[in-house]
Image (cartoon, helix red, strand yellow):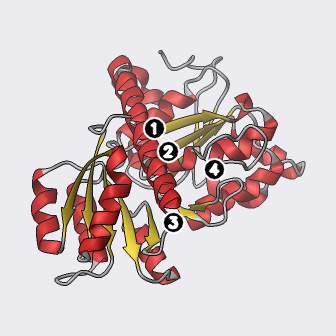
Amino acid sequence: MTTDTYRILVVDDDESMRDLLSSVLATFGKIDTAADGKEAREKFRVEEYTAMLLDYMLPDTDGLTLLKEFKELQPQTEIVMITHVREVKLAVQASKLGAFDYINKDFEVEDLRALMKRVFEKQSHVKEILYLRSEVERLTDQEFLLGVNARMQSLKLVLDRAASTSATVLVQGESGTGKELVARYLHQKSPRVEKPFVAINMASIPEHLVEATLFGHEKGAFTGALKTTYGKFELADHGTLFCDEIADLKFEVQAKLLRAIQEGEVERVGGQKPIHVDVRLLAATNRDLKTLVQEGKFREDLFYRLNVIPIQLPSLGGLGALPL
């Protein structure tokens, strides 16, 4: 890692704390500092920052006010709040405003370094996702996708209305009918279009890795967990998560998926704290979920959470698959 890899802004009115933070973080990249809100605003308006460490209490403003302003100006910048006392209320407020995490001023150096590594790992994942999304946009003609016949145009009207909401959508249809392309269309037409679209096929994940894949895991959580890894929910934060073959989701994991939908929170395998996520969930299946519910193989409460907007695709024997 070169010293020019990342640009970090440290905002704290305590000079000794600014010096300490700058020294600890120097190995990650170029460090800028600010002693108050005014100076921070001036620097933030002219530079693009990968990350920021932001003191909660400043002489001319409070950190939460700056956090909200900065996330609106540069939403891609990950912001870590710095506090004197760990307070649950502050953590919740900061999380809702988009903070990555927060630390106490009596932090251990290695804990801070580990936290910042997670920040930069997330940045790398997001860049990769944005690149893949741009490739999909380049290769997929959405208007061609939905064809011109009357029934497909009716489907398009339904999808356009559904896209403008944040409601969960359950896409059902035979294999090959274009369920993932419909999900991508919903994302492209939604207010979340500038955020990540993350797709996952539940049938392709080894059973013992389903939970870690969805929600992430901490280093050492299980054999082979050599580093902290973000789950699909975290990678899709503020964007769209598409869960294909949702009927294959393990029954015991279904309750955790339900909680993620209801509470907007996930917990990594081996983790000790909930992580707030803002994700629009789309699901798809080629099986009859109602029948699986009756057979006790799929949770009824999860089914109704997923089936807020049901989309039934035409069968292959009818209109044919959506063209690719």
Disc 2 residue type?
Leu
Disc 1 residue type?
His
The residue depicted at 60 percent of the width and 65 percent of the height is 274
Q: Position of residue 246 (x, y in %)?
A: 69, 40
The residue depicted at 71 percent of the width and 28 percent of the height is 204
Report if the CB atoms under discs 2 and 1 are less than 8 Å apart: yes
**For residue 215, which numbered disc appears in the image?**
4
Mark 2 or mark 1, whichever is nearer to me: 1
Q: Position of residue 113 (x, y in %)?
A: 47, 54
49 with respect to 314 (left or right):
left
The residue wearing badge 2 is: 235
Q: CA distance from mark 2 to mark 1?
A: 7 Å
Disc 3 residue type?
Glu
Q: Please say if 65 is above or below 213.
A: below
Mark 3 or mark 1, whichever is nearer to me: 3
Report if the CB atoms under discs 4 and 1 are less than 8 Å apart: no
In the orientation shown, which residue stands out farthest toward the right?
295
Q: Earlier in the sequence, mark 2 or mark 4?
A: 4
The residue wearing badge 1 is: 125
Mark 4 or mark 3, whichever is nearer to me: 3
Identify the image quadrant of the N terminus: top left
Q: Please say if 235 is above or below 145.
A: below
Q: CA distance from mark 2 to mark 4?
A: 10 Å
